[in-house]
């Protein structure tokens, strides 16, 4: 009988194999936690909500050029971030408006989906959209404390935003001029509140609305030319 000698385990290519797995997982969790805590300390969450919502809204306008459903999806992202921002900056009416935008976005998604499938729009759906719009306007007026210029500008901006959303959901070209007037009013409010992200973006939105109005006008004119007149 011959005895065989057991060779020692080779450590080449097996770096760290002897280290307990639980130790690696715990160190990774600790490192991730420290990174997150440092990021939170470096970035103010209100600033992140300010610029994050602004960029999402800018993307939604680009999607609106093409009447893409992503307009509504990105709008929901923007309004969610802005809801937290305005609630923290003591602007409850504008914060509530962001939630109402989300409800109106659901109406817009349903309407645009039916149109893309060439299905008739139920009258009940438009009635629901109208009820949401009027309810938002009524709540805004009731909750507003009309004791200064800022509150009057806020109510006017809310009313125009509701009208712009209603026209957008119905794909009316005149939604663009209404959006521009809304941007100008909100720019005044955000300048007063020193919310510089959304303040700067109002002018970007207004310029984009000019481009959108021009694009829709050309498309509309092209359809009229292509459609023969009937006597």
Image (cartoon, helix red, strand yellow):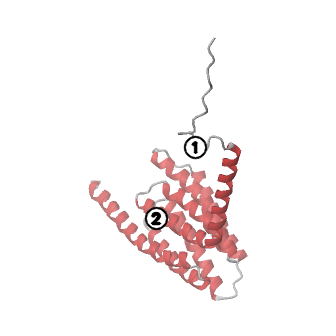
Left or right relative to 92: residue 63: left
**Between 13 and 32, the one nearer to me in the picture:** 13
* Gap in angstroms between the C-alphas marked 2 and 1: 52 Å
Residue 143: x and y, percent?
72, 75
Position of residue 129 measured from the top left corner of the image (x, y, whole percent): 60, 58
**Residue named by callout 2:** 61
Q: Which residue of the protein is positioned furthest toward the front in this rendering? A: 2
From the viewer's perspective, is 10 left or right of 29?
left
When the figure is inspected, residue 90 is found, relative to residue 100, above or below; the finding is below
Residue named by callout 1: 15
Residue at left offset 54%, top offset 65%: 165
Label whose residue precedes the other's in the sequence (2 or 1):
1
Local SS, label 2: helix
In front here: 190 or 5? 5
Is 160 located above or below residue 215 in the figure? below
Where is residue 147 drawn, in percent x and y? 70, 87
Q: Is 210 above or below relative to 17?
A: below
| Element marked by disc 1 | loop
Q: How many marks?
A: 2
Quarter containing the N terminus: top right
One can see residue 188 in this view: yes
Q: Residue 37 lies in what quarter of the image?
A: bottom right
Label 2 environment density (alpha carbons within 10 Å; few <14, some 14–19, many ≥20): many
| Quarter of the image with the C terminus in it | bottom left
Question: Between 81 and 143, which is closer to the camera in this rendering?
Answer: 81
59 with respect to 76 (left or right): left
């Amino acid at each position: 009988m011959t005895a065989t000698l057991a060779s020692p385990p080779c450590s080449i290519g097996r770096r760290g194999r002897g280290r307990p797995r639980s130790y690696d997982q715990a160190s990774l969790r600790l490192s991730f936690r420290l990174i997150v805590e440092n990021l939170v300390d470096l970035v103010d969450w209100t600033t992140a909500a300010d610029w994050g919502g602004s960029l999402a809204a800018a993307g939604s306008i680009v999607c609106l050029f093409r009447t893409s459903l992503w307009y509504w999806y990105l709008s929901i992202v923007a309004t969610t971030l802005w809801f937290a921002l305005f609630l923290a900056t003591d602007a409850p009416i504008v914060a509530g408006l962001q939630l109402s935008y989300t409800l109106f976005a659901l109406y817009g998604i349903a309407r645009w989906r039916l149109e893309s499938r060439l299905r008739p729009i139920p009258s009940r759906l438009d009635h629901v959209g109208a009820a949401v719009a009027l309810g938002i306007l009524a709540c805004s007026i009731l909750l507003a404390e009309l004791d200064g210029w800022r509150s009057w500008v806020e109510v006017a901006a809310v009313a125009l935003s509701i009208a712009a959303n209603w026209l957008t959901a119905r794909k009316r070209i005149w939604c663009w001029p209404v959006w521009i007037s809304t941007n100008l009013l909100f720019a005044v409010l955000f300048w007063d509140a020193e919310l510089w992200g959304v303040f700067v973006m109002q002018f970007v939105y207004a310029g984009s609305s000019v481009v959108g109005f021009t694009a829709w006008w050309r498309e509309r004119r092209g359809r009229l030319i292509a459609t023969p007149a009937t006597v």
